[in-house]
Amino acid sequence: MIVGVDEAGRGCVIGPMVICGVGAESMNIKGIKDSKLLTPEKREKLAHAIKKEVIYYYKILSPKKIDEYTRKNKLNVLELEGFSEIIKKFDPSSKFFVDSCDVNSERFKRNIISITGEIDIVSEHKADIKYPIVSAASILAKVKRDKFIKDIGYDLGSGYPSDKKTVSFLKNWYLEKKDFPDFVRESWDTIKKIKENTKQQQLI
């Protein structure tokens, strides 16, 4: 069996990070590519097809848990633990492919093995583009995360700090409520800036 593991939502200021592992004897579904290169509609359609052909598992990392690790400058550790937990759900004789979150992809590989035990694993940057099995994991992770964002029930954009709609939503929320809801990652610089700018405006 081959297994791909990837995440969605690492850089978001809103919502969880979703890690997904996908296992299959082969990956022959047409049109699979990195989830970021697909429209939401195409991702949904492919996710439906992928689920029929593979074994898959999710690990959901909440904003609260992400904040806890980010404040200790250990977000990579949290992701490492999540990837390793997913990998341990599969047959250890599988061939594993992971999209490395560490700038040093070989170090990420060694750190995973230190948790999982000896496995045959390929750790690379942009593995979601190179390997269809990782692309499949990326698609399932992204679709799952998109559902979390949709289920929040507000028109808040993508949840990424680069999204003006997301930032506007956060600014307006904080101005009105003087606090942030539990679906927001308060350790993010975006949130710190909103708090600081609001405080300065009130002093004027």
Image (spheres, helix red, strand yellow):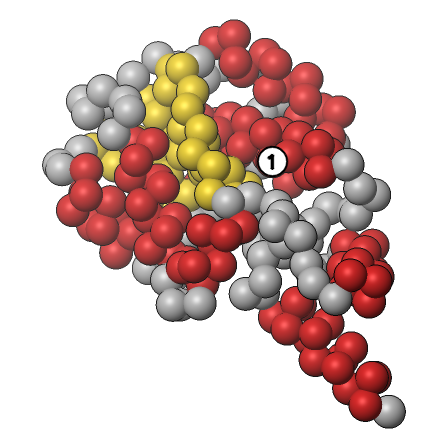
Q: Position of residue 90 (x, y in %)?
A: 28, 22
Identify the residue at the far left of this view: 118
Relative image position of residue 125 (x, y in whole percent): 43, 49
What secondary structure is marked by label 1? helix
Foreground: 151 or 126? Answer: 151
Q: Which residue is situated farthest in the right direction here?
A: 204
Q: Quadrant of the N terminus?
A: top left
The residue drawn where x is 64% and y is 40% is: 36
Which residue is outermost to the top?
52
Residue ID at (73%, 72%): 194
Instruction: Find residue 38 and report its image quarter.
Output: top right
Q: Which residue is mark 1?
A: 145
Residue 101 shows in the view: yes
Q: How many marks?
A: 1
Q: Is residue 105 visible?
A: no
Residue at 45 percent of width and 51 percent of height? 65
